[in-house]
Image: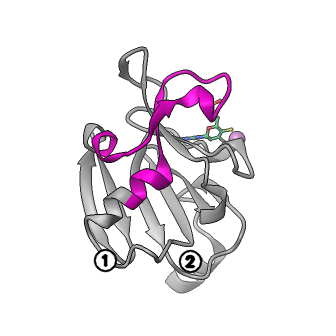
Amino acid sequence: MNIQVDDERCGSGEYAVSLLVEMAPEKLAIEERVPGVAGKAFDLKGWYRAWKSTRTDDEAAEPSRMTVEAADEFQADIPWDQLDQAVFLYEQDGKPIQKGYPLRLYVPDGSSECLNVKSIVRIRFFYDQSSSEATYGFKNQISVDELRLKK
Ligand SMILES: Nc1nc2c(c(=O)[nH]1)N[C@H]1C(S)=C(S)[C@@H](COP(=O)(O)O)O[C@H]1N2
Ligand SMILES: [Mo]
């Protein structure tokens, strides 16, 4: 299963988890960031900067937030400054993760454990003026604003 990556300024791509792992400069035991959880993870911001460096010369510009979307349509929208310790869990007991396959986010500095999104299929980076609060929930719960737009 591939993961779709979209960056508002640097375009899009689709990657196997193994390729994301290969790109990531910092792999670690997830216990180092999330005590009590076992397995291998890679650092989000390190991976993101490595990915971005292949696509733009403007590496200084950092996103304001990241959203992740799951196979079950759960999603989370997280301000960039909550993501310094964030990791993606990709392997447990030498195998792809079973709970949360193919990729699970953990946000140790995040405002809620609900942000630890399982079964990620899409990762998006935005640069707009965002709220400083993280949000999460199921995609098909349409907001009032969206209903207004659709009439
Ligand atoms: N894909 C997906 N990820 C998800 C959820 C979900 O419903 N779907 N629930 C979130 C919520 S609300 C919590 S509290 C945690 C629960 O993690 P656990 O299953 O490891 O206890 O997963 C989060 N990640
Ligand atoms: Mo939750």
The Cα–Cα distance between marks 1 and 2, rounded to whole angstroms, is 35 Å
Quarter residue 16 falls in: top left
Rendered residue at 25%/49% (across/down): 15
Quarter residue 12 falls in: bottom left
Query: What x and y, as percent, mark residue 37?
Result: 61, 24
Which residue matches tag 2?
146
From the viewer's side, name the closer residue of 75 and 43: 43
Rendered residue at 35%/57% (across/down): 50
Around disc 1, counting alpha carbons within 10 Å, would you say few (fewer than 14), some (14 to 19), or many (20 or more)? few
- Relative vertical location of residue 83 with respect to residue 150 in this rendering, above or below: above
Q: Amino acid at mark 1?
A: Asp
Farthest residue in the top direction?
93
- Relative vertical location of residue 46 with respect to residue 98 in this rendering, above or below: below
Which residue matches tag 1?
57
Q: Secondary structure at mark 2?
A: helix
Query: What x and y, as percent, mark residue 28?
Result: 48, 32
First of labels 1, 2 by sequence position: 1
From the viewer's side, name the closer residue of 85 and 93: 85
Query: What x and y, as percent, mark residue 32?
Result: 61, 30
Q: Secondary structure at mark 1?
A: loop
Rendered residue at 68%/74% (across/down): 131
Magenta part of the chain: 20-49
Is residue 32 rendered magenta in the image?
yes
